[in-house]
Image: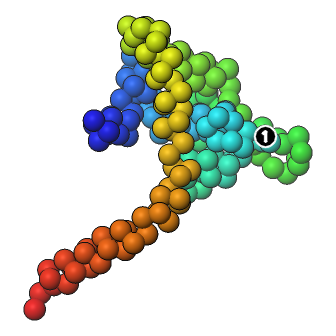
Amino acid sequence: MMQNWRRRAMRRELGHRALVELKVGIDLAQFDVLVAIEAPAAQFGDSAGETMVATVAERLGIDPSRASRVVSEMVEAGYARRAVSQADARRTIIELTDAGRAIIEAVRAYKFLILGDFLSEWDKADVARFVPLLRKFGQWPEHMEAGATKFADDIALLAKQIAASRKQAEPA
């Protein structure tokens, strides 16, 4: 079940479908750039300050040259604009245009409609149990270190088994 959910989430089926059905004309990578420019604190945690191309690259974990290319595409399409920094006039910042903001809002609304419809079929008790459990489940990455420490001996044994299997697979 988790593998199926993970694969579907990694393919970003809902976001892709939203872009297609809304006839936006951009792909998920370009949409990600718009979101990175907008910088919601819940997603990036660093929404204070101005957004530059380097900021977009950092938020998305891509190299600055790729970020520059995709930001330029969004500027050319009219979804973002370059502006002068209020903090340092030598610096160029990136801002969303009204059209770029409209795309983000429409895609989010689409997702809320689809997911809201799905959850509307659940009874209130199921939703009341699910939401706190999902929130709790979403915190598992913060507990990885503790789990790795707790199971250090088991993990070391697994690593030894992998090393032994590699050694057996080596040509003689």
Residue 157 lies, in percent from the top left, at: 32, 74
Image point (30%, 70%), residue name: 158
Front residue (pair 114, 30): 114
Please tell me in which quadrant of the rendered image residue 84 appears. top right
Image point (49%, 30%), residue name: 133
How is colour applied across the structure in the image?
rainbow
Residue 99 shown left or right of residue 3 in the figure? right
**Total labels drawn:** 1
Residue 65 lies, in percent from the top left, at: 56, 56
Image point (68%, 49%), residue name: 55
Q: Amino acid at mark 1?
A: Ala
For mark 1, what is the residue? Answer: 48
The image shows residue 103, relative to residue 8, as above or below, that is above
For the question of whether residue 77 can be seen, the reply is: yes
Q: Secondary structure at mark 1?
A: loop
Residue 29 shown left or right of residue 76 in the figure? left
Residue 88 shown left or right of residue 151 in the figure? right
Image point (43%, 33%), residue name: 27
